[in-house]
Amino acid sequence: MLDAVVVGSGPNGLAAAVTLARAGLSVTVLEAEATVGGGCRTLAPGDDGDLLAGLPAGVVHDVCSAVHPMAWASPFFRAFDLPAHGVELRTPDVSYAQPLPGGRAAVAWRDLDRTADGLGPDATAWRTLLGPLAQEWEAVVAVGLSDRRSVPPGVLDGRRPVRGTTAALRFGLGLLEQGTRAWGARFVGDAAPALLTGVAAHTITTLPSLAGAGTSLLLGALAHASPAAHHPFDGGWPVPRGGSGAIVAALRADLEAHGGTVVTRHPVRTRADLPAARAVLFDTTPRTLLAVLGDAVAPGLRGALSRFRHGDAAAKVDYVLSGPVPWAEPLVGRAGTVHVGGTREQMAAAEAAVGSGRHAERPVCLVSDPTVVDDTRRAATPRGERRPLWTYTHVPAGSDLDVTETVTAQIERYAPGFRDVVVASRCVPGDAMEQHNANYVGGDIAAGAATMWQLVARPTLRADPYRVGAGGVYLCSASTPPGPGVHGMGGWHAARRALREVFGVRVAPL
Ligand SMILES: Cc1cc2nc3c(=O)[nH]c(=O)nc-3n(C[C@H](O)[C@H](O)[C@H](O)COP(=O)(O)OP(=O)(O)OC[C@H]3O[C@@H](n4cnc5c(N)ncnc54)[C@H](O)[C@@H]3O)c2cc1C
């Protein structure tokens, strides 16, 4: 009998597997798809299931996550030590940018003061909102990536408890301000609020929302954070050299080095698909767990898990370009991430349309050009240069619309001439996201609506969000706290509980 089986090889599943294997347990990861990594996969054109034609051989592209502030900041990944495992995170000077009407743009530099200086009348508003959070980023991360059930280490019991607690309080106050109708109170111009709203929109909720505010403050702080001198990364919003799959490859290699195994093309649909094991950790949605082991779950919890709600969707459009995006404001071209959607009001209107089940005419689009910091992502061909451009946009849950023209037109609005550099494109509509990752129900890339309630009571309002009844069964995916993102924290929190409760290991490795 195995010690542990992990169902699903996303970053949370692999984080759980690595934590268990490093404790000396026998661990097998079962993955439904042909490739490992879930929402953190990098493919080359022609890979199984990948249809992005037009990229030259050797140029890879990310099919889900692309930009990784949480990978350098997460307590799990800091303990795991990505650089020691060969992962190079490349940080652009501009963490993210927000093109604005009239050829203008707001730009979030790594440097907070340089950012504030570019925001005219809102320089002080930006400095006072994000400066203290960027300074105390470790406390902000401890709160933002916690299990939502205990006081996070680094806040009360950290090295600087008073500063940590003050930062946590500031974060809470910022949440109440930016997550409610008071969100405009501190701003005078349109650039700073638009810049912040582009980040809030990552949650795919109507805005303002507490969840959106939490996301904008956490990721906004990391954009300007400068880790201590002993920290191997530069902070900011980095892109892994060679694609997000580098993170997955590092986790998988570590797992295998500690005796663990990964089996691909092994969907777990029923109990019979699971080998005998003392603990089973599901890097899946509650829905999948219930389909496989529902009869073993107490009726009350079964009912609560079956009420877990999925949110609106993302539809992806990936491009092959013959050169850089011709942004009207050239500074935007220095950003690793661009939020395309205009002003705060325009983005709120677009998110409101999606929230009410309609396709926005001018939706919020997330755009990442990895070549800004990673030269391996482009190549010269006899027909000229070729490089991928990664984008996705927000659509109603279950949407089957091909949004290529909508996204192209939206980028063209802020980058006239964009169409001229597009060589090829490929859309994965919202409802098709689920075909390559069962966790993305109806295109919900957060594996559960990212409302404030569901980010706290994730997946249900119980003292332990990971343990699912007796028998060593745990949920460890983005459907558990802290929620979506490549941080491995759901897996780490769940695996440490399993170690303690099933195997009597009180001091977890890492
Ligand atoms: C388009 C897109 C863009 C994103 N951009 C970013 C970004 O830039 N930065 C960031 O930090 N995050 C981003 N995210 C979010 C991030 O990718 C996810 O939150 C993260 O991958 C969640 O990790 P996970 O381990 O919980 O689940 P996943 O990564 O979703 O992995 C779950 C795995 O379980 C497998 N599985 C599911 N059911 C079964 C079953 N029954 N049997 C066997 N295997 C099963 C799936 O195939 C999958 O491999 C993005 C996501 C998407 C889709």
Image (cartoon, grey):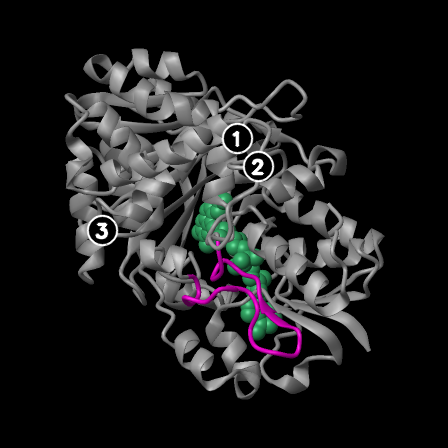
The answer for how far apart the CA atoms under marks 3 and 2 are is 36 Å
Residue underneath mark 1: 161
| Contact check, label 3 and label 2, Cβ < 8 Å | no
Using the rendered image of the protein, determine whether residue 495 is visible from the camera's viewpoint. Answer: yes
Dot 1 amino acid type: Pro
Kindly report which numbered mark, 1 or 3, lies closer to the viewer in this rendering. 1
The answer for how far apart the CA atoms under marks 1 and 3 are is 35 Å
What residue appears at the point 75 percent right and 51 percent down from the top-left corner? 507
Q: Secondary structure at mark 2?
A: loop
Which numbered circle lies on residue 440?
none
Q: Quadrant of residue 128?
A: top left
Residue underneath mark 2: 157
| Contact check, label 2 and label 1, Cβ < 8 Å | yes
Using the rendered image of the protein, determine whether residue 416 is visible from the camera's viewpoint. Answer: no
Q: Is residue 37 above or below residue 87?
A: below
Q: Secondary structure at mark 1?
A: helix
- In front of the other: 433 or 296: 296
Dot 3 amino acid type: Thr
- In front of the other: 319 or 65: 65
User: Label 2 crowding class (10 Å Cα cut-off): few <14, some 14-19, many 20+?
Assistant: few
Q: Is residue 193 above or below residue 389?
A: above
Q: Is residue 255 above or below residue 246?
A: below
Residue underneath mark 3: 206
What residue appears at the point 75 percent right and 80 percent down from the top-left corner? 276
Give the left or right position of residue 93, taking residue 19 as reference: left
Which residue range is magenta in the image? Answer: 458-481
Q: Is residue 438 magenta?
A: no
Q: Is residue 471 magenta?
A: yes
